[in-house]
Amino acid sequence: MIGNVDNAFATIERTDPAARKTSWIMARDTADTPYVLACESESITRYAEDPYDPAREFCDAIGGDAAAIRVLVLPPCSPTTIACMHEHLPNVVRLLVFDYDTERWLAWRAAMGERLPDRVDAFILQPDADAVARGIEHELETHRIDMISGACRVYVPRRMKRLAPGLCHVLEKTTLRVHQEHCSDAVFRTLRSWHLTLNHLLNAEAIGRCVQMDLSPRFDTAVIVGAGPSLDRNVEQLKHDGGSRVVIATDASVATLLSYDITPDIIVSMDDSPLTWQFFAAHLDALTTVPLVMPMEANHTLVRHYTGPVVFVNNLQKADENVLATQADESVACGRCVGHLAFHLAERMTTGRIIMIGFDLAFESDRYHTKHAAVPYNQGKGATTEVFLPGIDGAEVRSDLGMMFYLNYFEKAIRECAIAVIDATEGGARINGATTLSLRDALVAHRPQRGAAPALRRHGDDRREVEAAIMAVSTVVTRAIRSDLPTAGTARAIIDDILVIDRRISEARRDPGRILTGHHAAPLGWLPMASPAFPLVMSCSSLLTLARFRTAWFQGPRFSSNTVLKSIFADVLDDLAEAVQILLEALRMVNGGDTGERRHMLLLTPEGAEPLWLEAATRISSGAPIVSLPAASSLTRIWATVREHGVAQIVVCNGDIVPDAWSAPDIDCIDIKTSYAPREHERNFWIPGYAVAGIDDTLTDKWRCHVPEHITCSNYIDYIRDDGNR
């Protein structure tokens, strides 16, 4: 639920004419003026728009943005204003009219005639804050691209805002919130969607050693554990409580639970980033029997090196969004964060109730994780976009936009949940819909009998199963494009399809203007959209770049002389070409593209490399075959070199690399340090295969104090072997 909606609807009781025994009618001032909505009370008529020229305010409000608007959200407006919108918004595809006052709605509908004009959709909603917000959110969901590209607006006449403040408030606030969420998702997809695809393909190769788990509802109570700062205050109650229940821990909470000698029954993880490895690296010996449940697009490093059983699940919420599907045996909604996955997993496995602890969704001072957590995110930096939310004690708590989105999702999930939910977090933001209790009271309230332990079954180690999982990535996602899905084949077939797309993109990049002129009705229509590989390519492309192109496409002339459009189209083609190369190299990795023994060392040489680094790199690699690339080389070029030359180790200078360069092909990386200048992003490096080599003992000691204990850190001399290998 969005902030202050409850207050807005409470205001209705005092200020909305519909709540003061007034009547809503369509009225006009004279026989020559248009009909507009008005409310009558004690012989006084108050118009919801200018009774003489209701369309003028709309034209003034829109100004020069008319061509940019494709979706407009509004309350019931006069037929004259609606007609003006059709006339002055050349690219509009939908006018979405919302109301919750039945009398006002009926009066407006009667004036609009039996049939609404084209492109006008009208909705009467229940007079409830949640219902109105959900209704608006549902309709806007189909206009995701328009929201992202800024082509969705809200129009509320000033007079309507005074007469129906509750409706106008929720229209504006809900549209803003949905816009923020879609933009947040678009940024994530632009920056990380390619990485989700990469993880899925790499994890498909590991499916043979993963297990299946029975998720049927066999437990009366599930305790899901977040990693908010309040967890330090009450987690010990789980240790001393005599009741029995299934404990599902988020990855960030594992260290805190283990510090109190509490071993969770199940751990969930879903982030694609290598940072999640930090939650497990120091505790692997204690987790050899604890199932780790994760979607297949989660961190591939974690899948490869976790010591316990790994359970893949399908993400229910992505089945119809042209994103990856899996061959996992169970499907669970994953939500927007790992806490949502824990909630939905508990919902699947529980018949009685869910107890939530550690879900503060707010800062405590400047912390939002427990003191024991190996926090790999922006701990200590404060809020990104600061917001204030109602706390469990009634006072406001400081949070940020991301955590507010997580809270909104939890509240929606709780509304739709068939079992009781107890918030025993004892701190942070209030989670509407959950019963607030202390953890002690929640545990004492009912002590269920323990259900059976999670039952596991190991997959068969069959290469065909791996290939089927890989192929499923590119076939199931085509459902929105074609109905006759092809049967599963090999990764080689997908590569062939991608190569066809690659050739067409290369041709288009040679003359973007010709493509725009020849395909003015559908600028990407020359691509084989029915190909099973096409959704894969799109999953690695930039949604923001496509949205920018779409905006330019609708706002300007659609031919090659439009230099702005041509430039943005060239950016789209470059982005698609990069997506193709990422996919080709990833598929070649999982399809056994490298053959023979890995012996070479790859030197990523920085421009103007220091003599000290060159000497150290040369000595470390002495005796081994060497191949060299500029440090600025693209990730796909590095992967291709690793594959073609049988590279076993990459040698870099002062962290000038991305982790996927060595983690995806599963090789080693030696980072030669010539100075002590830690950078924030280097925490991503602290995964298996990474080692630090100091240029001297003093520098090595500084880095050894900085990196975690599980990261090898030695003087570069220690890496020199007679055969050139570590």
Image (cartoon, helix red, strand yellow):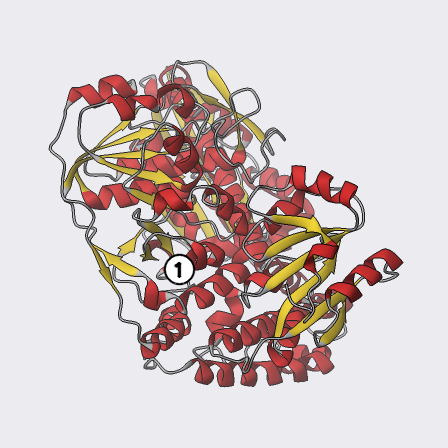
Picture coordinates of residue 654 (x, y %)? 75, 52
Picture coordinates of residue 407 (x, y %)? 41, 33
Between residue 100 and residue 497, name the one nearer to us. Answer: 497
Is the residue 585 above or below the residue 375 in the image?
Answer: below
Is residue 48 toward the left or the right of residue 212 in the image? right
Could one spot residue 341 in this view of the protein? no
Picture coordinates of residue 496 (x, y %)? 50, 86
At mark 1, the secondary structure is loop
Is residue 422 toward the left or the right of residue 586 in the image? left
The quarter of the picture where the C terminus appears is bottom right
Is the residue 658 above or below the residue 434 in the image?
Answer: below
Q: Residues within 10 Å of mark 1 (few under 14, many from 20)?
A: many
Could one spot residue 666 in this view of the protein? yes
Q: Quadrant of residue 567?
A: bottom right
Is the residue 315 above or below the residue 393 in the image?
Answer: below
Between residue 317 and residue 72, name the one nearer to us. Answer: 317
- Determine the residue positioned at 76% across, 72% down: 628
- Determine the residue positioned at 47% across, 74% down: 590
Labels in figure, total = 1
Question: Mark 1 highlights which residue?
Answer: 296
Q: Quadrant of residue 451?
A: top left
Is the residue 69 above or below the residue 46 in the image?
Answer: below
Is residue 580 toward the left or the right of residue 346 in the image? right
The quarter of the picture where the N terminus appears is top left
Is residue 355 toward the left or the right of residue 272 in the image? left
Picture coordinates of residue 263 (x, y %)? 31, 36
Q: Amino acid at mark 1?
A: Met
- Determine the residue positioned at 56% across, 79% down: 597
Q: Residue furthest front?
A: 722
